[in-house]
Image: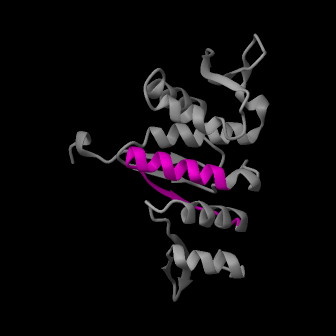
Amino acid sequence: DDPNNWTPCQFVHSTGLDSVLISKYWNNVQLKSPEKYVHEAIQIIGSNVERVSIRNHETHSVPIAKIKDNDEPVPLRSMGEGMTRIFGLALALVNAKDGVLLIDEFENGLHYSIQPQIWKMIFQIAARLNVQVFATTHSWDTIEAFQQAAAENTEEEGVLVRLKRKNDKIAAICFNEDDLKVISRDKLEVR
């Protein structure tokens, strides 16, 4: 029960991270090796972002971005909900080193077209930092994006778990990567 022996566990709510967690997580990675992973994640949709930082106000913290050919930083949220979501996911992921990352409603704020790239990024960073990732979704696009990223990543295994109520109990039905290929190809309902 020694807190020093606990496994790190980070949680990204369906609405994202609050400003207190963003500030805390950023302080943990700023000017350290994991910061590069956060920057790589942001580059998925913000290739014009040169740097990211946090501007602290009296009551909250605001992520800001230095944009190429722009002298003044802009609030990250002004670049869209997807940018804020990716930033939060990446921050939580790098702060879960040697632990677990829980993501509620992965797809929130993310356009379906970029989800395969985000999953690919998550697979890569999670492998580098020894993080086990659990994500919930109701989105078929997210399942297809997950399948695509899992198929491309031959070193790590991705599993889809469907939770189903059975006789007043919850049963878990697991689908491996081969199952996922068939599910995605034939559009079988697993949500």
Tell me the magenta residue range.
116-139
* Quarter of the rendering containing residue 69: top right
Q: Nearer the viewer, residue 29 or 62?
A: 29
Name the image quarter holding residue 19.
top right
Residue at screen point 49% across, 49% down: 124
Q: Is residue 64 above or below residue 132?
A: above
Q: Is residue 107 above or below residue 8?
A: below
Vertical comparison of 93 with 64: above or below: below
Residue 178 point in image, percent of width and height: 53, 77
Q: Residue furthest left?
A: 2
User: Which is more toward the observer, 95 or 184?
Assistant: 184
Residue 157 falls inside the magenta stretch: no
Q: Where in the figure is residue 58, as x and y percent of width and height? A: 61, 14
Residue 107: percent from the left, percent from the top? 68, 55
Q: Quadrant of the C terminus?
A: bottom right
Is residue 86 positioned above or below 21 on the image?
below
Res. 17 in view? no
Q: Is residue 127 magenta?
A: yes
Residue 165 horizontal side relative to residue 2, left or right: right
The residue that appears at 46% across and 39% down in the rendered structure is: 94
The residue lying at 42 percent from left, 43 percent from top is 96
Q: Is residue 122 left or right of residue 49?
A: left
Residue at 62% from the left image edge and 64% from the top image edge: 148
Is residue 186 or residue 103 the one in the foreground?
Answer: 186
> According to the image, what is the colour scheme of the structure?
one colour
- How many numbered callouts? 0
Residue 3 showing in the rendered view? yes
- Outermost residue, top side: 71
Q: Is residue 59 left or right of residue 25?
A: right
Q: Position of residue 170 (x, y in %)?
A: 50, 79
